[in-house]
Amino acid sequence: MAGEIMASPKSNKNTAKKSNLPPVAAARLKPFIDRGIANGIFTDDSAVVNMFKAKAQDPTLKETLSSLGGLKSEVGQAFLTDIVLTDLTAILRQKRYTAHMKVWEVSHNTVGAASGTPRAVCNIFGQVVVETDDEVLDPALFSMSLWDADASIGDDVERDGVYIASVSCKALNSATLDLKALAGLTQFVEEEYEHSDSVEMLKDTYEVTPIAELADDVSRGRADYRLVEATVSFSGVQNSKSGNQFGKMLLKDESTMTLEAIESGENLLLNALCSTDIATRYGKYSRVLALCTTKVQGEWGLSASIAVALGVIVVAPPVAETSSVAAKEDDASSYFKKAISLDDDDDDDDEEETVEEVVVEEVVVEEPAPTKPSKASKASKGDDDTSEEEAAPEATSKEAESASPKEGEEGWVEGDDDSDDEWGDWE
């Protein structure tokens, strides 16, 4: 009996769980970890341990941490503990929800590069079912913007993917929920979850507005969406003046394709900016449901920024064909064989052989001059060269005037950070 009693303390000591945090951090963070477990935010201390490790490896903190003696010093540990505690207290004050998400659109961008303050942002849009402590809410739409370091959370998120994640949200009764990431806790984990039909979900949430009526009721904020059901007249990727790529779509619906609209000379389409992914997903004549924000701006008139586009009838965009000439040039033996057997007669050759002859003439430029071409050939070639040189600049100029967005405009990229709010352009 006595032996058993004396063995008990040793047994308890061996079974006691050792913290994975440094002593300084474990002592200060334990009360907050216990509160998070009691509130259902944590199941154990693993989330806080991961937060501490992430801060210890943060390259922006490396120099400061090193000057304090590194991770092994108590001063360095105390510094990291303060940082974790800053985020942890914010998490404990936020209401945590479980979100079952189906992603409709996801995009990664860098904004503010032109002003010298580049910021990474990942924008995600889709439908969600939110679970609270007491109930499961009705399906809703959601938008989520991950800024700076949080942008990497969405690296593995894919369009049409189904995920579960811990999030926060200020207003659960909004038409589109503005979900926020919980620092160190939000992770997108794939799951199997049955969501409702996306097109029906979008139409049940927003009423379709005719394009002809958009100018009379423009968006009053970045989350004040308008739903348009229209046919794609043009879709493509273009370059802005700052060198960034953006998507552009021109949309028409029944309200703009009328005889009255044609006779009045009114604008017959909606000029919309979008992600490059959306622009390359739908070809001309596709019918789409586009959820967008709208504005009227000076000489540009009515324009829109598309947050999400769902295909009702999808026409595949044109695919660039691979030239057969390039395929032949990849075969080195075939290339040189043709170069050796090249003749100088005036027989008509097919288009591929003509191109190959031009290439060979460029390679053997130091050899004696070939037979003098006829006057007709010279005239024909001269006319072709002139027409190409004169036509190209004109087309480029017209494209730049119609395609490039107004200087300083970030295009379709949206965010929710007050410090980077660009809604000031909307008036």
Image (cartoon, rainbow, N blue to C red):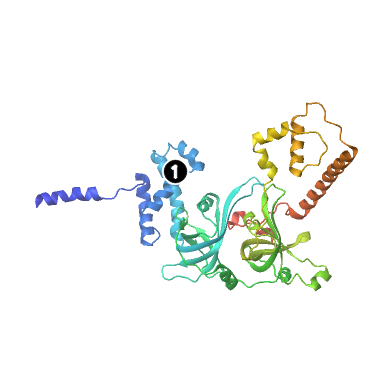
Along the horizontal axis of the image, is 133 left or right of 269?
A: left
> Looking at the picture, which amino acid does disc 1 mark?
Ala
Q: Position of residue 9 (x, y in %)?
A: 19, 49
Residue 333 lies, with reference to residue 81, above or below; the image says above
Q: Relative to 328, say whether 291 is above or below.
A: below
Horizontal and vertical percent for residue 114? 67, 47
Q: Position of residue 55 (x, y in %)?
A: 46, 46
Position above or below: 401 against 253: above
Q: Quadrant of residue 133?
A: bottom left
Q: Is residue 22 among what the camera can see?
A: yes
**Vertical position of residue 415 compared to residue 132: above or below:** above
Tell me if residue 223 can be seen.
Answer: no
- Residue denoted by label 1: 56
Q: Going by the image, does 304 lie left or right of 62?
A: right
* Image point (74%, 38%), residue name: 356
What is the tally of numbered marks visible in this picture?
A: 1
Q: Nearer the viewer, residue 160 or 302?
A: 160
Identify which residue, 297 or 94, lies in the foreground.
Answer: 297
Question: Residue at coordinates 47% horizontally, 63% vertically from top-left?
Answer: 99
Q: Quadrant of the C terminus?
A: bottom right
Image location (x, y in percent) of residue 105: 58, 59
For the residue pair 75 and 378, the one nearer the viewer reads as 378
The front one of 135 and 282 is 282
Residue in the image at 51% along x and 42% along y: 60
The image quarter containing residue 208 is: bottom right
Q: Is residue 192 left or right of residue 343?
A: left
> Local crowd at mark 1 within 10 Å, few (<14), some, or many (≥20)?
many
Q: Tell me which residue sits at (67%, 36%) in the image.
A: 334
